């Protein structure tokens, strides 16, 4: 009989080259395309993890993400108010199923600005320097195009140079007004390539997530089994 744990581990090992996440942008070989980072769409079932991710941001990152020093209560209200039917939320999970980076693509609710959307992103401090913010931005741009969005906005504090640099490299026009900046990026219309690419990337991300869930379940079960074995061994060696 095949050990299910062996099967799960073999499946993960077989796909780890496809899903391997870069540890540093500087480690990429010159001339080679960046490695695939699975980015999946998040739904209501991920709301708790979204809140946990945002609360894990340090005070400076909270300030840059929201434009003010958001408290835990304010973050909880933000997470509870997310409209998954209207907006699109994207996330990057690590092997421990920790949401280490996420983006919010908020579609306009103004009928006169129906083809506009706003982008916001956050990355945990220990996951910085891997290009996750730029990857999430590219993913959001592709989805926005496929949804008929023609203009993407990024409202950020002027000191948020990382976010503004991402927008600038994408060709956005940036207007600075004191401590705040506004970036405007005009998007091309959707085409067959953008639609097919989004479909394939989402399927890859869903597969990657399922593998990570299976792996976590296996290692959690293994930890329980080992704990039980230790308990049995210790009881055998206790003096009667």
Image: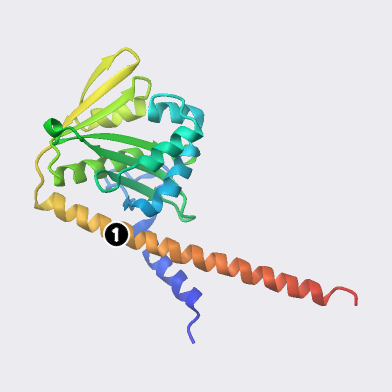
Q: Is residue 40 left or right of residue 188?
A: right
Q: Which of 24 and 216 is in front in this view?
A: 216
Quadrant including the C terminus? bottom right
Q: Residue at x 56, y 69 (%)?
A: 221
Q: Which residue is drawn at 49% across and 75% down?
A: 6
Rendered image coloring scheme: rainbow
Secondary structure beneath dot 1 equals: helix
> Up-down: is 19 above or below 26?
below
- Residue identifier under label 1: 204
Camera sees residue 107 = yes
Q: Is residue 83 left or right of residue 10?
A: left
Write down the quadrant of residue 199 in the picture: bottom left
> Up-down: is 139 above or below 230?
above
Q: Residue 215, position in %: x, y?
A: 47, 65
Camera sees residue 21 = no
Residue projecting furthest to the bottom: 1
Query: Count of labels shown?
Result: 1
> Up-down: is 19 above or below 83?
below
Q: Residue 63, position in %: x, y?
A: 43, 26
Q: Residue at x 19, y 53 (%)?
A: 197
> Up-down: is 97 above or below 61?
below
Q: Residue 34, position in %: x, y?
A: 30, 47
Q: Crowding at label 1, few (<14), some or many (≥20) Cα neighbours within 10 Å? A: some
Write down the quadrant of residue 232 in the picture: bottom right
Q: Residue 234, position in %: x, y?
A: 79, 71
Residue projecting furthest to the right: 240
Q: Which residue is drawn at 30% across and 28% down?
A: 165
Q: Which of 230 and 144 is in front in this view?
A: 144
């Amino acid at each position: 009989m095949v050990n299910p744990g062996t099967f799960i581990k073999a499946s993960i090992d077989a796909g780890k080259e496809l899903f391997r996440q870069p540890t540093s942008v500087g480690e990429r070989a010159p001339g080679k395309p960046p490695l695939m980072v699975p980015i999946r769409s998040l739904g209501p079932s991920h709301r708790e993890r979204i809140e946990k991710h945002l609360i894990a941001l340090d005070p400076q990152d909270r300030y840059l993400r929201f434009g003010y020093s958001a408290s835990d209560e304010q973050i909880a209200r933000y997470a509870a108010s997310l409209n998954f039917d209207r907006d699109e939320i994207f996330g990057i999970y690590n092997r421990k199923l920790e949401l280490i980076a996420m983006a919010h693509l908020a579609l306009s609710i103004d009928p006169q600005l129906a083809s506009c959307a706003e982008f916001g992103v956050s990355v945990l401090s220990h996951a910085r320097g891997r290009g996750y913010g730029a990857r999430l931005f590219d993913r959001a741009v592709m989805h926005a195009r496929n949804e008929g969005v023609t203009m993407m906005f990024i409202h950020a504090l002027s000191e948020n140079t990382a976010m503004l640099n991402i927008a600038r490299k994408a060709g956005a026009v940036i207007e600075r007004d004191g401590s705040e900046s506004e970036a405007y990026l005009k998007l091309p219309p959707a085409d067959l390539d953008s639609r097919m690419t989004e479909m394939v990337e989402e399927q890859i991300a869903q597969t990657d997530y399922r593998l990570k869930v299976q792996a976590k379940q296996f290692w959690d079960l293994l930890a329980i089994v080992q704990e039980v074995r230790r308990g049995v061994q210790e009881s055998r060696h206790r003096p009667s």
